[in-house]
Amino acid sequence: MKRLSSSVKTILGSILAVTLLVTLTIFVFKKPKENVSDTSKTLNVLNWTSYIPLEVIKDFEKESGIKINYGTYSSNEELLAKLVSSAEGTYDLVFPSDYMVDLMSSRDMIVPLDKSKLKNLENVSPLFLGQSYDEENKYSLPFLLATTVFLYDSTKLPRLTSYKDLLNEKLKNNLILLDDQRIIIGAMLQATGRPMNDVREDSLEDSLNFFEKLKPNIKAFDSDSPKTFFITKEVDAGLVWNAEALIAVEENPDLKISYPAEGFALSMDNYCLVKGGKNHDAAYLFIDYLLRPDVAQKIVDEYPYISAIKGVDTVPENELIEILNNGSYVENVGADIKKFDKLWAKYK
Amino acid sequence: MINPSRTTIPRGVFERFSQPVPAKTATTRKEKPSLFKTVFTLPIIFYALLLIALPILYVFFLSFLRSDNYGGYLYEFNLENYGEILDSTYLSIFLKSAVIGLATTAICLAISYPFAIFLRGKSERKRNFIMKLIMVPFLTNSLIRTYGLITLLRKNGVINSTLLNLGLIGAPLNLMYNNLGILIGMVYTLLPFMLLPVCSAVSKVDQNLLDAASDLGAGKVQKFFKVYLPLTLQGAFNGSLMVFTPAIGYFFIADVLGGGKAMIIGNLVKNQFLTARNWPLGAALSILLLVITFLLVKLYKKIGGNLDELGGG
Amino acid sequence: MRLIKRGGKLRNLYIFLVLLLLFLPIFILVAFSFNESKLNVIFTGFTFDWYGKLFENPDLLDAFKNTLLIAVASTAISTVLGTIGAFGLYKFQFRGKSFIDKLLYIPIVIPEIVLGIALLSIFTLAKIELSLWTVLLAHISFSVPFVITSVRSTLYAMPKNIEEAAEDLGANRWQSFWYVTLPILKPGIVSGALLAFTLSLDDVVISYFAAGPGTNTLPLYIYANIKTGISPDVNALTTLMLIFTITVLALSAHLESKKQLERVIK
């Protein structure tokens, strides 16, 4: 990269010249967008990868005249890191899961919601309100519920029912796990018969031992799009998010979904306003838009998670109640978060 | 206009610096502050202090603080972060990363030397043409090229399906989502950085020396070790420096081709800042990287390398 | 030459293979830009659709525009700063000069990630919001030293008394810099600028740390989408950029051979 032979200079010179010209033309001939740089018209959103279809964002932009700057993250820890490392006022709206809502509110990173600004509030199903991480929904309102599930190729493997089934010889270098420290460490804890939020040293040690046994089977960690690994037949089994699994099954009906008997993770993602955000008004408009049943339907049509909006059903109600009863939320463990950070580095 | 200070400079200085000798200081002239001098020195001083010295000093400072677990830090000075680097978890990543970096450098060298020597025998037109071809990947963004690589390397990618169809392998090879994948990615991305300096150094080797070596009965291997290698050592080291440093730092290649489980130092540093929220540890890791680089640069200078040549020109 | 004849074929084959290695992933990218399927896995059929869809993808176009904008702006600024700096450092003595000199080599030799996190830390410390401006600042910070080394190599080759001569003839120092020094430095400045431009276009690591919400560059767009699957419109854009590069390469080759021919005739 760093050395240029003289004969190459002419080439690069011409490239630079033409690029300059092209850029200038783009700017001269492009109609100036109406007040896009105006801060009251832009909304800075940070959200999970593969969560809101591009179409929904574009529709909202058209309807409201607000431009959304949309950034993504793949885990709650990444979201937390991005928020603390950015200057106040960088982001307006984020979508942390349960325990992260608790953590962020306790650290004064998010502000209470003014629910009077949300006309469509009544559309939220009471089933998802008043959860332990924010009992009065002071800081958060539920958006989508994700669960971890097994996804496997039924032509190659028997039905997966327990985390121990992942140790199958057939799965050597053939398994994908979510790239998420709390979820995966939680699963390993459950695999060894402990609760998912156990922070005792010996429990964590056990989880590491189980993980070491599993290691030869793991091909990759990915939270952004584990479905791709199945669609391209890179792996035959995995512990992935429910919507990812459903999309993969649609592409390949040989793939089957099951729930781990030892328990699985629930992850309720919520709307939260970042402290110091410059455009909370626009954020309320966007939340209100997402609370509309037709919009919520569009979202789950593309990413079939469980919507918190009444009447938008991806799973029948009795099944949903069963899921809510058997799954468990990741909990905020306070300063013990460091144990998980450290252990995760060891895992990988 | 007569400048009084000029008369103090001995004439010899002009002759000396009219030669293209990259001496450390070009002039001994002392100037009184003037607008002219201010305009030509102040901006670069500001730039160097604000955009280079300050950020790096701050990282150095950070490396002695303690993380508060949430992304902030406590002003409690300690050496724990440097102690933590020696933790077996991190040491094994270092070791692996160093192996990948060295292997990348070695493979790039091994590919580049024969290429450069064979290219030497070509006519100038052909040589120019081929050097231009090398520029094409050089001008295509490395991430875009890495993305192209995925299409080739994945389980049912172009390489595996071709080999399977030809009956050369029975089951798909694991070419990515492991250390091999990272190595392939690094070699592929960084090869041009080695090809350019090595080709340029080899092309400058005096043909008379090679002829003399042949006349004295030197074989190809001898010619390489006795003539080419000593004369092109600087070029090779220059290339190695430009390959090795990115090869331990390009986290995106390890991320994409390593499947999120095979980490190099670059990922480790990135993760401390962007996931684990332990900036002090990340800072300590960066300082370690800095020290490694400075040692390599020292070595480069020791074998007579010119720092300016690292920066093109 | 006997050297060339013996084993000449094998040598050509080797050169060909190395070039193939460099180009194969690029060929694949181009091939899949004509693929009907959205997934870059199997070739299902030929289509030009993605070239049309490319212009309906505002995010991709935005990222592309940002990339060009940053590259052009950072090249312009670092070229001016680098040229002035190289000249100032060459011409003047001041306290701490050797320190500044050493500092200027740092961005050339250190791993990009170190500069990236160092800049991010400083931006956070100073509470500067990450935006296109911070990306620009970051690009300037790693480009300037390359411009300086490039300009410096021409400065050292410059006959020094030429400036003195101009000043003796009545030019003031500004004039002698503008009319005498600058034209002599032009080759160094141009190659420095080109280097800065290429570096900016290619950068992933430093931009990754310096970019904020809504400031995608092309490499960052690809990095963000590489796992969820990049649709072939990115391949189409890459192909267009390649055609552009290769055309310019071919054109310059043509011009050069013409120049050579003229030289021979004369």
Image (tube, coloured by chain):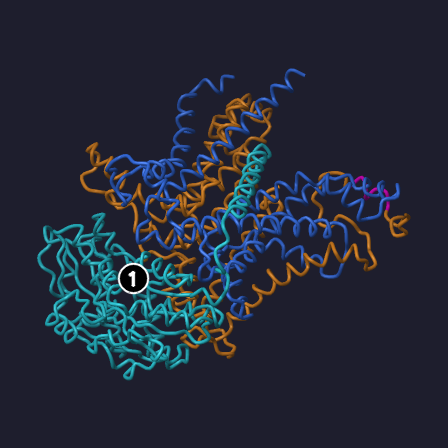
Q: Residue at x 27, y 45 (%)?
A: C39
Q: Residue at x 66, y 41 (%)?
A: C188
Crowd class of label 1 (few under 14; some 14 to 19; many from 20; radius 10 Å): some
| Residue C165 x/y as whole percent | 85, 40
Whether residue B241 appears in this view of the structure is: no
Q: Is residue B210 left or right of residue A315?
A: right
Magenta stretch: includes residue C240: no
Quadrant position of residue C233: top left
| Residue A108 x/y as whole percent | 41, 80
Give chain A's shade: cyan
Whether residue B56 appears in this view of the structure is: yes
- Magenta stretch, overall SS: helix
Front one among B209 and A107: A107
Q: Is residue A103 left or right of residue B46?
A: left
Front one among C56 and A237: C56
Q: Residue at x 88, y 41 (%)?
A: C169
Q: Amino acid at mark 1?
A: Tyr
Q: Is residue C91 left or right of residue B177?
A: right
Where does the magenta region start and end?
Answer: B10-16
| Colour blue belongs to chain | C
| Residue A231 x/y as whole percent | 21, 50
Quarter of the image with the C terminus of chain A is bottom left
Q: Chain of mark 1?
A: A
| Residue A292 x/y as whole percent | 27, 68
Residue hosting label 1 = A51
Toward the bottom, the furthest residue is A136
In terms of secondary structure, where does tag 1 sit?
A: loop
Q: Residue at x 31, y 75 (%)?
A: A119
From the viewer's perspective, is residue C81 above or below residue B206? below
| Colour orange belongs to chain | B
